[in-house]
């Protein structure tokens, strides 16, 4: 299953090598809603900042997300966000999100990866992560999650640099994160997505992952889906 351990950061890392959340924890694109007149008009605005703050502070668990590979194998993904005790990261006390991703497929052992992500609120902002293999990520904000965004809106979120360990002597990957609100085919809820485009040092191919939460106008999270695009195929877990 190591080929599905895409990034070395946390779930929202947008979204998460794990989830790695797609994750660092895992992590790739959200599917849109139905086309044409079959898709209800959604005039609502959505508070992505509140949604992420609640998910990180209160915890969330999504199990049984499935994707079918090109060879027909059904891969199952599980994502868990848990709240940890505040801790110092890069010299400053930060809030902590504990993130775990499990991936299983027929005939293969279940793989579990985890990461600790450091963040603050008001506005919601991530600063970096450390995964269970020791990979060390640093995030620099390029924008904030919106408090009132509509379907179709998108914007910058952060850039990330990943290192082999906390010494930060060896860079292994660079990534750019953006946010987007996508239709879920209803007039009352929408997908709040964090898209990560990453490239490992020495590679010519981008790794793309998109972690999406279904939210209502109050910012409550009710479901998740995750898309990861590898050089050879795209997997959408939902």
Image: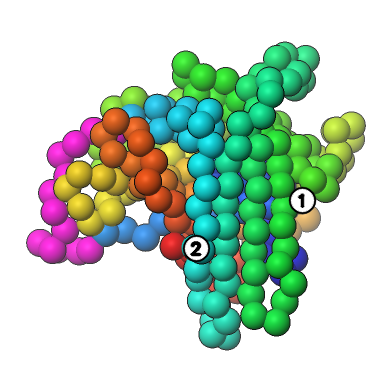
Q: Can residue 18 be seen in this view?
A: yes
Coloration of the structure image: rainbow
Q: In this view, does 115 lie to the left or right of 220?
A: right
Residue sitting nearer the eye, 36 or 130: 130
- The mark found on residue 201 in the picture is 1
**Image point 28% across, 54% down: which residue?**
184
Q: Is the magenta stretch mostly helix, strand or loop?
A: loop
- Between disc 1 and disc 2, the foreground one is 2
Instruction: Give the quadrant of residue 148.
Output: top left
Residue sitting nearer the eye, 108 or 162: 108
Mark 1 element type: loop
Q: In this view, does 7 lie above or below 234?
A: above
| CA distance for labels 1 and 2 | 30 Å
Q: Is residue 74 above or below residue 228?
A: below
Report x, y in % for residue 156: 46, 34
Q: In this view, does 224 lie above or below 38?
A: above
Count of numbered marks:
2
Q: Mark 2 points at which residue?
A: 65
**Image point 45% across, 30% down: which residue?**
54
Report x, y in % for residue 165: 86, 39
Residue sitting nearer the eye, 99 or 180: 99
Q: Quadrant of the N terminus?
A: bottom right
**Image point 89% across, 32% down: which residue?**
167
Report x, y in % for residue 78: 57, 57
Label 2 environment density (alpha carbons within 10 Å; few <14, some 14–19, many ≥20): some
Q: Nearer the N terminus, badge 1 or badge 2?
A: 2
- Name the residue furthest left: 37
């Amino acid at each position: 299953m190591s080929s599905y351990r895409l990034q070395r950061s946390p779930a929202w890392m947008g979204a998460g090598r794990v989830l790695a959340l797609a994750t660092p924890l895992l992590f790739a694109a959200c599917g849109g809603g139905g086309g044409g007149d079959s898709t209800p008009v959604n005039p609502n605005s959505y508070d992505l900042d509140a949604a992420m703050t609640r998910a990180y502070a209160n915890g969330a668990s999504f199990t049984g997300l499935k994707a079918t590979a090109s060879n027909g194998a059904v891969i199952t993904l599980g994502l868990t966000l848990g709240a940890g005790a505040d801790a110092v990261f890069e010299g400053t006390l930060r809030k902590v999100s504990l993130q775990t991703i499990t991936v299983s497929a027929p005939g293969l052992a279940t793989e579990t990866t985890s990461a600790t992500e450091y963040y603050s609120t008001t506005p919601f902002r991530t600063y970096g992560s450390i995964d269970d293999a020791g990979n060390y990520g640093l995030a620099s904000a390029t924008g904030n999650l919106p408090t009132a965004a509509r379907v179709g809106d998108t914007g910058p979120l952060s850039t990330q640099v990943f290192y082999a360990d906390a010494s930060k002597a060896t860079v292994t990957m660079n990534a750019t994160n953006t946010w987007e609100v996508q239709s879920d085919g209803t007039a009352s809820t929408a997908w709040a997505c964090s898209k990560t485009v990453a490239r490992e040092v020495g590679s010519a191919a981008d790794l793309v992952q998109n972690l999406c939460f279904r939210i209502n106008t109050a910012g409550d999270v009710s479901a998740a889906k995750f898309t990861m695009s590898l050089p050879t195929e795209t997997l959408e877990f939902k």
